[in-house]
Amino acid sequence: MTGTMTSERAPEGLDTEAVVIRVRGLTSGFGDINVLENLDLDAYRGEILGVVGASGTGKTVLLRTVLGLIPKRAGTIEIFNVDRAKADLAQREAIDRRLGVLFQQGALFSSLNVLQNVQVPMREHLRLPQSLMDELALLKIELVGLSADAAIKFPSELSGGMIKRAGLARALALDPDILFLDEPTSGLDPISAAEFDDLIRTLSDTLGLTVFMVTHDLDSLHTICDRIAVLADKHVLIEGAFSDMLEFEHPWVRAYFRGTRARGING
Ligand SMILES: Nc1ncnc2c1ncn2[C@@H]1O[C@H](COP(=O)(O)OP(=O)(O)OP(=O)(O)O)[C@@H](O)[C@H]1O
Ligand SMILES: [Mg+2]
């Protein structure tokens, strides 16, 4: 079942044009240990890909390696058909500008208010007058469902859900084509998590974003993900639709997708 393309959004056969992230034979790790070995994974344009796996299996390492923040030990990673390892600085910067990231640990700057946080990538990559940056940042803040009041608040003054939204606004600052989310709904109550899921789905649909989402949240996987990739034993064990997960025979996949927590979803 590995490598099957069951989502309606995924193309028939291998349409390389539609693959926006192509990972082949990836090995990544620290010291004597490889966290990921010989891992293959594709993400298709416009899809929401859910990446799931037990805690410590290397989901965050995978996301950070794809982003070039952790050096890979072997394999290739192509984003928009460009291999970062073979690209020059200008090409790498051009790609990085098209990627938005919401890290697992929120990572807002505590000394900056929300508006200023959202402007950090703009300052890094664009040369714009302050008034224009203010306007653009306010648009992003509105887009993620925060009020203008929230724009002048500091991270310590925000709820967990507001922090997630502010982080999302910052990830969207440069109008990315691919959005990387690491556990975006962790720590949110089920209603806030569902609202956040709706927001991601709407953004993906309206902006045509590809979303690479690491998540533990079965509801998110079921409700908004077009395809799911399961990480286990250092590689992607299976890629497919939610229904494929229910049929796959592997102890962890079975326990996760057909265990007690999954009952409400599977009926
Ligand atoms: N900077 C680092 N140095 C050394 N080891 C690391 C580093 N970052 C991660 N690891 C190790 O890599 C493995 C995978 O970690 P990772 O954070 O990717 O797990 P995860 O699947 O994201 O887990 P969780 O679901 O809890 O977030 C773990 O054993 C972790 O200890
Ligand atoms: Mg993680």
Image (tube, rainbow, N blue to C red):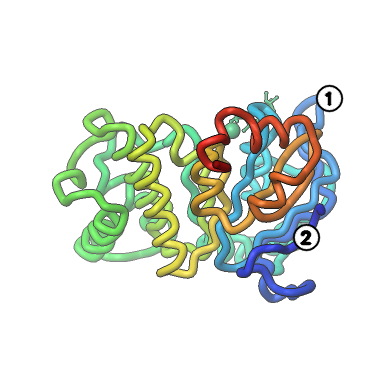
Task: Identify the residue shown where x is 43% and y is 54%.
Answer: 200
User: Residue 134, image x and y in percent?
Assistant: 22, 58
Q: Which mark is residue 108?
A: none
Whether the residue under disc 1 has CB within 8 Å of ligand 1: no
Q: Which residue occupies the extreme front position in the image? A: 267
Q: Quadrant of ligand 2?
A: top right
**In this rendering, position of residue 48 left or right of residue 13:** left
Q: Which residue is mark 1?
A: 32
Can residue 236 be seen at all in this image of the molecule?
A: no
Image quarter of residue 45 = bottom right
Task: Identify the residue shown where x is 67% and y is 35%.
Answer: 53
Which amino acid type is marked by label 1?
Asp
Front one among 200 and 108: 200
Q: Which mark is residue 4?
A: 2
Q: Compared with residue 177, is residue 26 higher up or lower down, i.e. above or below?
A: above
**In this rendering, position of residue 145 left or right of residue 16:** left
Task: Identify the residue shown where x is 69% and y is 76%.
Answer: 17
Secondary element under disc 1, as helix, strand or loop, is loop
Q: Compared with residue 16, is residue 257 higher up or lower down, i.e. above or below?
A: above
Task: Identify the residue shown where x is 42% and y is 36%.
Answer: 106
Q: Compared with residue 116, is residue 206 higher up or lower down, i.e. above or below?
A: below
Q: Compared with residue 190, is residue 79 higher up or lower down, i.e. above or below?
A: below
Quadrant of the image for the C terminus? top right
